Image (cartoon, rainbow, N blue to C red):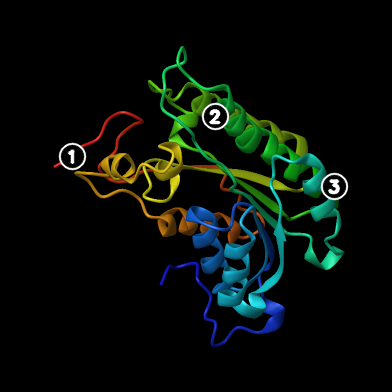
Amino acid sequence: MYLWQIDMKNDKPQNRRGVMLITGATSGFGAAASRMAATNGFQLVLTGRRGERLRALQSELGSAVLKILDFDVRDLVATQQALAALTDAEIPNVLVNNAGLAVGKEPIDQGFYEDWNRMIDTNVKGLLHVTRELTPRMKAGARIINIGSIAGRQAYPGGAVYNASKFAVHGLTEAMRMDLLPRGIQVAQVAPGAADTEFSTVRFKGDESMAKSVYRGYEPLQAEDVADAVLYIATRPPHVSIQDLLIMPSAQASAYHYHKS
């Protein structure tokens, strides 16, 4: 048990944490954060593109889930319609902008426009769509946690557009924190290094052999490690603002330095 976890046996309804909305909740960091938040007193609004997975997660987590919303954050109209349907009681006091992906590893002179658009539209515009629709209804004391990446701090070969999108998340997080300071809304970033989720499977377009090779020879982060960081930030006392958290496996020192066996 982590130090910040509440004792659910002694937990009373008035001690519940509030509402957490997680985008990209159907896999990886989003699914892990959903499970961890549910067992630590949060009510959940979960969003994602894969309705079947959302419904399965809702069934698993039971009454902790207030609502599931099946939409793609890239689609502005769908995002607006889905989030406008939230009641005041369903507006989050913690928003986790988790939806994101990397696609392809080609150098810039060989990249595919479709891959580039998918990354920019999801990682940057999707975050903006959700944030713009929700922040006017969020109250003082709320927190926004953006999922960034070591790729948003250090560029690497074959990652140009993914790097650009995550550098944008880093910059947006800092600017959002300033914009929302007068309203008492905290803004944080969790930036993971190598983590064994569906990330590499998506990046290599379903090539499981290539995806597994990324994590060979060392122990990467697991989705739960990153979810733990998200929950830590989300549960700090109101006067404490964890603004930026870089989390790496112990075998990784930078975007390109690993110690492998």
Q: Where does label 3 land, which residue?
A: 136
Residue 169 visible: no
220 above or below 65?
above
The image quadrant where one finds the N terminus is bottom left
- Residue type at tag 1: Lys
Q: Residue furthest bottom?
A: 9
Would residue 260 appear left or right of 15 to someone viewing this image?
left
Q: Residue at x 63, y 69 (%)?
A: 55
Marks 2 and 1 sit apart, C-alpha to C-alpha, by: 30 Å
Marks 2 and 3: which is nearer the front?
2
Amino acid at dot 3: Pro
Residue displayed at 66% across by 75% down? 16
CA gap between label 3 and label 1 equals 47 Å
Q: Secondary structure at mark 2?
A: helix
Left or right of 165, for residue 246: left
Q: Secondary structure at mark 3?
A: helix
Which tag, 3 or 1, sits closer to the chain's start? Answer: 3
Q: Residue 198 in the image: x percent, y percent?
A: 43, 49
Q: Is residue 111 above or below residue 103?
A: above
Look at the image and tell me in which quarter the C terminus lies: top left
Give amino acid for label 2: Asp
Residue 199 position, x and y percent, is 44, 44
Q: Nearer the viewer, mark 2 or mark 1?
A: 2
The mark that comes first in sequence, 2 or 1, is: 2
The residue where tag 1 is placed is: 260
Which residue position holds label 2? Answer: 115
- The Cα atoms of the two marked residues, 2 and 3, are separated by 32 Å
Badge 1, how many Cα within 10 Å: few under 14, some, many 20+?
few
Q: Position of residue 22 (x, y in %)?
A: 63, 56
Question: Which quarter of the picture shows residue 87?
Answer: bottom right
3 to 243, vertically: above or below: below
Residue at 65% over, 84% down: 12
